[in-house]
Amino acid sequence: MLIFSAHVQAGGSVDLTDIQPLLAQEPSLWKLYSDGLEISPHGGGLRLGSADIPLRGYRVGPYEFLAKLKGSKEPYDLKLTITTDLYFLDAQNREVTDEKLAIKKEEMLKSISIEPVNPPARNGSFIQSSQ
């Protein structure tokens, strides 16, 4: 069962090396991105933040990292987003819905996407499709 936490707060730094086990769940997918992109080793994720949960302070997805084409001399101009499904587990590795009972988390890689950091502004023109 996928858990959505009401105790997630914005902002928390994360290193790419910290989520390598997550990326290893889908090595072919990760290779597609890591072979063609230079990805910043430091990014961000959401932070579990409620004072009344044992997992307070843990980072969870989605994770975001700046990226650029490998070999590019330009600044990072892409945002790589790694989306996960989050599960909370108790001491017996059973899934729980009450985060106050959770002593560990498990994340499953859901998707990796990329988009421009600064998408082009709309200039009023549009593309007309021919039918």
Image (cartoon, rainbow, N blue to C red):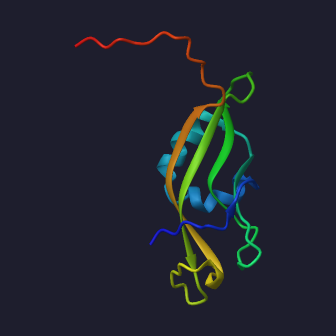
| Quadrant that contains the N terminus | bottom left
- Figure quadrant of residue 72: top right
Is 74 rendered above or below residue 65? above
Q: Is residue 96 left or right of residue 57?
A: left
- Figure quadrant of residue 19: bottom right
Say which of 56 and 78 sits in front.
56
Say which of 72 and 80 sits in front.
80
Say which of 28 and 9 sits in front.
9
Name the residue at 72% across, 30% down: 76
Q: Position of residue 113 (x, y in %)?
A: 53, 41
Q: Is residue 39 left or right of residue 27?
A: right
Is 89 rendered above or below residue 42? below
Say which of 106 and 101 sits in front.
101
Is 123 rendered above or below residue 58? above
Q: Position of residue 4 (x, y in %)?
A: 54, 66
Name the residue at 52% across, 58% down: 109
Work out which residue is located at the far left of the displayed protein and give it: 131
Name the residue at 56% across, 11% down: 123
Q: Position of residue 31 (x, y in %)?
A: 54, 45
User: How many callouts does the rendering have?
Assistant: 0
Q: Is residue 23 left or right of residue 76?
A: left
| Quadrant that contains the C terminus | top left
Q: Position of residue 49 (x, y in %)?
A: 74, 67
Name the residue at 35% across, 11% down: 128
